[in-house]
């Protein structure tokens, strides 16, 4: 029977099938960070369990790290405690740690791929929902809870039932100014936040195939915002070119063998998905969100929808009230106080380059605070080598040190209550960027233009 990409990788990792539909499922890479690992370490220690394959675990500090003065002790007590605990646990259990100040430190979903730790055909988990990012390489990658983090530490396996499969195809050429972020925000706006619940999504079609690896990571990153267990894209020459020569990618003969295997990882003609959806790339415009979940997105020049099902009207009104918007209103001309360019969705070198290209020779609006936070030390280094830091400084943007930053305000970077922030992150929930903060999700290009204009504008005018 013809197999999907998901079937091929899943079947290759089943250690044993348990009657009743569960599989003992092998995990190739386990990524950990300071937020969800402490409880797992406590659990395995309390039960006296050794780590089964610690060489398959890689740790980094990202959520709680400050993005200024990383050479100094962390000021915020809880953040300092979390990062110290990770360091202590990794030392005790002899786990590879890319901690604060390490040249490989970064947001876990930026650091893993750029070092070549993430590879096609792998199974990858982390106690973090945006682990779906790694699916961009044709891997089964998904977030797990803290008790599962402990299970993987102790056994390198998880007990799972196979998720249903969904293929989302977007074919055609995208319009100028439409980026990977716009494509996925568009798809989520069509499906809603629960539209892919219970499914593992494969993205197919020319709109995805034409994306760089950075763009594919942006797409897969946001899969879980429509409820999906994960997202994946079949590996191809773009994937191989990105990986070749990276630190932990196979080398020499092993590289040739790996590429030969990776080239078999695609969905075969006639393979069946539990659900199939398709969209036309030409229908996608530069996007922005207007509400308090990522499904509340629209074309930047559209009006906030008024046709909402009766069952959703109460939560819809509450959401718009929080944001200070009205149904039927345009967001064009809305004044913005903050612009945040960063997070595991859009903090890679390609994102920084795109912003720098646009802001070169321009200045941000005086009333806007614009921060740009690289996803890793490597991205930061590359940005400095390419002179991006100078371009950003001249435009009035503040280039910070790597970390999750204001994506979730678990550190010192917070958006004040009531302020509007155009953000390249992945979640616009109430208070996500700080208590009372109001987030509008968008691409790095939209964010950069907003910072310069000080308000939301129809970016297509700029591109013309
Ligand atoms: S950048 Fe945001 S979404 Fe990504 S791992 Fe950090 S906190 Fe989570």
Image (tube, grey):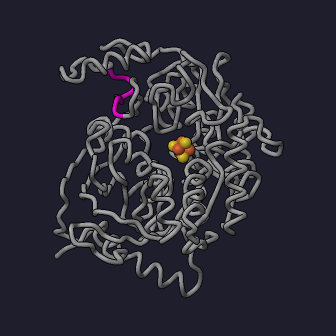
User: Residue 26: percent from the left, percent from the top?
Assistant: 41, 72
Q: Which residue shows up at 70% across the image and 52% down it?
A: 377
Location of residue 249 by image quarter: bottom right
Q: Quadrant of ligand 1?
A: top right
Q: From the viewer's side, name the closer residue of 157 and 446.
A: 157
Which residue is farthest bottom? Answer: 253
378 with respect to 439 (left or right): right
Q: Quadrant of the N terminus?
A: bottom left
Q: From the viewer's side, name the closer residue of 413 and 173.
A: 413
147 with respect to 188 (left or right): right
Q: From the viewer's side, name the closer residue of 89 and 364.
A: 89
Depicted 37 relative to depicted 156: above or below? above
Chain part drawn in magenta: 295-303
- Does residue 376 appear anywhere in the picture? yes
Helix, strand or loop: magenta stretch: loop
211 with respect to 380 (left or right): left
User: Residue 196: percent from the left, percent from the top?
Assistant: 27, 46
């Amino acid at each position: 029977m013809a197999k999907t990409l998901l079937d091929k990788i899943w079947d290759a990792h089943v250690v044993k099938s348990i009657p009743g539909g569960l599989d003992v499922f092998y995990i190739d890479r386990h990524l950990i960070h300071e937020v969800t690992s402490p409880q797992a370490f406590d659990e395995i220690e309390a039960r006296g369990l050794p780590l089964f394959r610690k060489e398959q675990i890689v740790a980094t500090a990202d959520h709680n790290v400050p993005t200024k003065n990383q050479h100094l002790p962390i000021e915020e007590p809880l953040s300092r405690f979390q990062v110290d605990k990770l360091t202590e646990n990794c030392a005790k259990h002899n786990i590879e740690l890319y901690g604060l100040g390490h040249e490989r430190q970064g947001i876990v979903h930026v650091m893993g791929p750029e070092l070549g730790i993430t590879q096609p055909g792998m199974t990858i988990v982390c106690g973090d929902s945006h682990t779906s990012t790694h699916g961009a390489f044709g891997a089964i990658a998904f977030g797990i809870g803290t008790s599962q983090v402990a299970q993987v530490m102790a056994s390198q396996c998880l007990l799972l039932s196979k998720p249903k499969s969904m293929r989302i195809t977007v074919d055609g050429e995208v319009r100028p100014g439409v980026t990977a972020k716009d494509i996925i925000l568009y798809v989520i706006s069509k499906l809603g936040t629960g539209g892919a619940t219970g499914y593992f999504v494969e993205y197919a079609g020319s709109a995805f195939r034409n994306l760089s690896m950075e763009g594919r990571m942006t797409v897969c990153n946001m899969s879980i915002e429509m409820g999906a267990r994960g997202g994946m894209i079949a590996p191809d020459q773009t994937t191989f070119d990105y990986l070749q020569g990276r630190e932990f990618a196979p080398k020499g003969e092993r590289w040739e063998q790996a590429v030969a295997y990776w080239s078999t990882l695609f969905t075969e003609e006639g393979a069946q998905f539990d659900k199939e959806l398709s969209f036309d790339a030409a229908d996608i415009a530069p996007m922005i969100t207007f509400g308090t979940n990522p499904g509340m997105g629209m074309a930047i020049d559209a009006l906030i929808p008024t046709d909402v099902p009766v069952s959703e009207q109460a939560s819809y009104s509450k959401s718009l009230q929080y944001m200070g918007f009205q149904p039927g209103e345009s967001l064009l001309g809305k004044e913005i106080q903050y612009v945040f360019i960063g997070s595991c969705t859009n903090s890679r070198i390609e994102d920084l380059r795109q912003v720098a290209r646009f802001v070169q020779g321009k200045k941000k609006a005086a009333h806007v605070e614009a921060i740009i936070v690289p996803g890793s030390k490597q991205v930061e280094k590359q940005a400095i080598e390419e002179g991006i830091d100078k371009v950003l400084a001249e435009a009035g943007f503040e280039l910070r040190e790597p970390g999750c930053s204001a994506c979730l305000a678990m550190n010192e970077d917070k958006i004040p209550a009531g302020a509007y922030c155009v953000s390249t992150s992945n979640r616009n929930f109430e208070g996500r960027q700080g208590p009372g903060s109001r987030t509008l999700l968008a691409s790095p290009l939209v964010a950069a233009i907003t910072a310069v204009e000080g308000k939301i504008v129809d970016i297509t005018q700029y591109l013309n």
